[in-house]
Amino acid sequence: MKHQLKKQPRFSKTGMTLLLVASVLVLPLASLNAAAAGVKLPRLSNGKPDFSGIWQTTSAADYDLEPHSNRKDAPPGPGIVEGNVIPYLPKALEQKKKNFEARETDDPRTKGWTLGVPRGIYYPEPFQIFQRANDLNIVHQFGHSVRTVYTNGSEHPEDPWDWWLGDSRGHWEGDTLIVDVRHFNDKTWFDRAGNYHSDALHVIERWKYLDPNTIEYKATIEDPNVFSRPWEVSVILNRHREQNFQLIEDYRFTLDYDDAYPPKPDKQ
Amino acid sequence: MKHRMSHRQLAALSLILGAIVIAPIVGTAAEATKAQSAKTGQEQQPAPTQPRANPGIEQEKTVPQIASGKWAGKRLPDGQPDVQGHWSNTIANHNNFTDPQGGIPGDPAPRRRPLPPRDERAPSRVSDPADGQVPFQPWALEKVKEFQANFHNPVKPQYVEPLARCAPGGIPKSLYWHGYEIAQYPGYVVFFFNSGTRIIHLDGKPHLPDNIKLWNGDSRGHWEGNTLVVDVSNQNGKALFGRTGEFISENGHIQEKYIFSPDATRYNYEAVLTDPTVYTRPFTVTIPARKWTEKDAANGWHFEVEHAKHSGKNILLDHYERTCAENNGGFGLGAVEAKK
């Protein structure tokens, strides 16, 4: 899907005609233009968009970022990669194919490991954003792992550790939150199909409200050890609005041993 | 590529190698060394033979009095008392629940310093009953003794303290492990622990259905003056209270009070634990805590922050990722990687 947000036509007398002629095209554009059209977005007291809330995509991206037919362990999906194909270097493509063959056992998700970036965002479990002026804390239900996005003007540390979720530094361009994420380890995958990266991964995220209950999330992914050029994914995130909805902790990496606790009375 | 070697990873490896006896000492020392070396320009690492200028984990021996009452301090725009920031308990870690500064019972590792008499150590975290002991039913007390007897050579999974596997610390243990951050948002107080996250809901929604059981339970809170009052249900009872093995079960209920001092530099945690299947009566746990700010030096246990890189002159604090990476794969990433 091509995004043409910067070239949207202003609504005018032609608006009605467009609605009649091509309502399918125009309606999404109108909603994309929610902020400009005067729809009130949630905002912090400093005026920045407030993404606080519980979010989840309806996309099947986590099964396979690329377009794919149905298979026993995945529904079909159109993929979320701009241009459809992830530009692997030849050797890395071989590794990806090996990963795919071994996906049932080698996908870090199956071990309950932290999902990484951007996978945690389009993984089919909710995550909650807790936002203040100086930071956003993203709590993923899966593993209850926490990523802090600093929006206090600070920069990446100079010689840091490798992290599962990288080091996230954000800034605002208008109402879009741009997050630069670096310093990853190489232990996470992008999806269940074995798409992967090295510890040279660099992700640039763009978070933007389409309307008060919908976020457009885009991520540019680059990794010179694995890909021949940067590539982009895009998903829509929907706000959970069910009554009393909440995250339910999912520390699934404990499931292999937690039957040992707590002590129980001896059987009579 | 750099990898963090924390005391948890060392502890896990030590377990695997059977070198269990040295794990707590190695862990603490490694933790301190790591923090000191990670912090450039800081040259305060004490030699083991010198008296410590920094009191380390055991900052204090007593519990200050903080009365419940009105809140006259700073408030957030949503009206909550502003208690945000980095906090940690002042007494001890999770080595010993009822004799917090008494070390792990039966520890075969030699002490670096002689243990002072009991009345010169901090009181039990059990503040009621007066004897400082958990009022266990006989069967449960036997299980605790069994855990303690096997802790240093855990031949069965149930003798491994689950935090050593990066399981969430649970309640109340999370409050006397490493330092943690309290963050507040409209409708929420959130605790970011190194091992687990607690989201306390302030909106009065009902608890989760009874059959859902969680490491940190399900928390509903409200403010009464200077006191955050929290009702915790849906415990899974798995976390244990420390290396001494005390526990609550999935039938337990916890009522917590976080009583903050007027200047928001201290709070006392007072929790009543009830469990008709494990205890003979409800009992009270008291844990004092203090706040750590950018005026304090990072210390590798209570206050694990870095100074952020930025162009301004003020100090901005970074807290690096809390993912328990080394044990992120069940019994331990160390173990997982060793298989290769």
Image: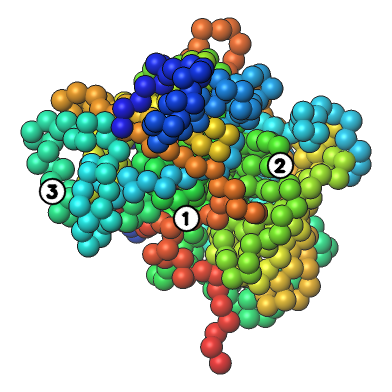
Horizontally, residue A110 falls left or right of residue A241, namely left
Q: Secondary structure at mark 3?
A: helix
In the rendered structure, the residue with mark 1 lies on which chain? Answer: A
- Residue visible at 74% across and 71% down in the picture: B135
Residue of label 2: B187
Q: Which of these two is toward me, A241 or A183?
A: A241
Residue of label 3: A98
Q: Residue furthest right?
A: B69
Relative to B325, is B33 above or below?
above
Instruction: Report how far apart the C-alphas of labels 2 and 1 lie in the structure.
Output: 24 Å
Quarter assignment of residue B1: top left
Q: In the rendering, which numbered label is found on residue A251?
A: 1
Q: Percent x, y for residue B162?
A: 49, 59
Q: How is the image coloured?
A: rainbow
- Residue visible at 56% across and 59% down in the picture: B215
Q: Which dot, 2 or 1, sits closer to the camera?
A: 2
Instruction: Report how far apart the C-alphas of labels 1 and 3 lie in the structure.
Output: 28 Å
Q: Earlier in the sequence, mark 1 or mark 3?
A: 3
